[in-house]
Amino acid sequence: MIRQIFKVFKALNSNAKPWQLSLGVCFGAIIGLTPTLSLHNLALLFLAFIINMNIGIMILSFVVFSGFAYILDPVFHNLGYSILKSDSLQGTWESVFSYPVALVANLNNSIVMGSLVVSLVLALPLFFIFNVFIEKYREKLQVYIEKFPILRSLKIVRVYQTITGGRG
């Protein structure tokens, strides 16, 4: 667990642009909130490997948000059910579900529909919130945190291990 925390700080302190880290959070949130074996999640994973973004942050975000998904499944079901049964959208669903891709995407499942809608609505605010958080962290907190003596000693241990080849 401590190793993952150090990896998050390493990513925050890296040369990666804030949008790359924020996009990792957004992709992880969408993948975590929706059922894992979905067509849109495969498309997001494909995009994640094409776009230059932090995969570690995406995985951590996926783990965190999938914990929330189990709690929110009844909400996702109710929302998805109401979207799928909406009288004003019946013509749209009939035309959408006439294509086999929509059936493979499992959009007729109320939990998939509800969680996809919620995760897509949350994605944009999450992107901007984490983008501002990362910029403020790098601007103000990063310098302050690096002043702690324990972190300096950890850097010295890493340098020593690098020089000695991991012995000691």
Image: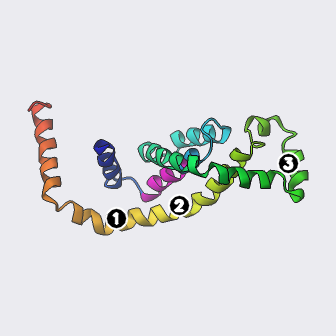
Report the Cα–Cα distance between label 1 and label 3.
44 Å
Mark 2, residues whose alpha carbon is within 10 Å: few (<14), some, or many (≥20)? some
The image quadrant where one finds the C terminus is top left
Q: Which one is in front, 76 or 116? A: 76
Q: Which mark is residue 155?
A: none
Three-letter code, disc 3 = Trp
Indicate left or right for 84 with 25 as reference. Answer: right
Give the magenta-colored segment's residue range.
18-28
Instruction: Considering the whole magenta stretch, tell me its main secondary structure.
Output: helix
* Mark 3 or mark 2, earlier in chain: 3
Tell me if residue 21 is in the magenta stretch. yes
User: Which residue is denoted by mark 2 in the rendering?
Assistant: 126
The stretch drawn in magenta includes residue 45: no
Q: Residues within 10 Å of mark 1 (few under 14, many from 20)?
A: some
Distance between the Cα atoms at labels 3 and 2?
A: 29 Å
x and y percent of residue 131 in the render? 46, 62
Side of 155 where 30 appears, left or right: right
Q: Residues within 10 Å of mark 3 (few under 14, many from 20)?
A: some
